[in-house]
Amino acid sequence: MPTYLAKINIMPHKELLDPQGKTVAKNMGNLHIEGVQDVRIGKHIEMNIQAEDMNVAESIVDQSCKKLLANLITETFSFTVEQV
């Protein structure tokens, strides 16, 4: 059975306040890092999956995000899947 690598990005909805991102953006100036307009902080997850084919692997990732990895009320997710 082939193995697939899923790369998942989970980010807070753009409409919601991101306190971590705001804190980082604010402190960039204290470190003399100029020009940063906004910072949004999320999660990056990599997952190895054994599946019959790409469609099954993508379905596993989608269900994992919807049921466990992302809080759909406050977060959005995107992912890519590649065979390894």
Image (cartoon, rainbow, N blue to C red):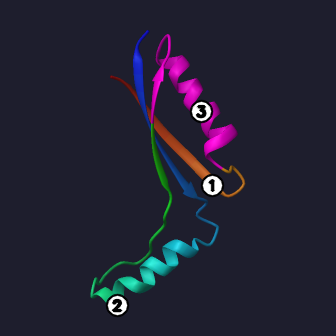
Find residue 75 and name its label. Answer: 1
Percent x, y of residue 81: 43, 29
Q: Residue at horizontal 40%, vertical 19%?
A: 3
The magenta stretch is 47-70
Say which amino acid is labelled 3.
Asp
Rendered-image quadrant of the N terminus? top left
Q: Going by the image, does 63 lie left or right of 28?
A: right
Disc 3 crowd rating (10 Å Cα; few below 14, some 14-19, many 20+) is some
**Distance from the alpha carbon under mark 1 to that under mark 2:** 29 Å
Disc 2 crowd rating (10 Å Cα; few below 14, some 14-19, many 20+) is few
**Distance from the alpha carbon under mark 3 to that under mark 1:** 14 Å
Percent x, y of residue 72: 69, 49
Say which amino acid is labelled 1.
Glu
Q: Going by the image, does 47 lie left or right of 63?
A: left
The stretch drawn in magenta includes residue 4: no
For label 3, the SS is helix
The stretch drawn in magenta includes residue 59: yes
Say which amino acid is labelled 2.
Asn
Secondary structure mostly seen in the magenta stretch: helix
Q: Earlier in the sequence, mark 1 or mark 2?
A: 2
Disc 1 vs disc 2: Cβ atoms closer than 8 Å? no
Percent x, y of residue 35: 31, 81
Residue hosting label 3: 62
Q: Earlier in the sequence, mark 3 or mark 1?
A: 3
Find residue 46 and name its label. Answer: none
Rendered-image quadrant of the C terminus? top left
Residue hosting label 2: 30
70, 55: nearer the viewer: 70
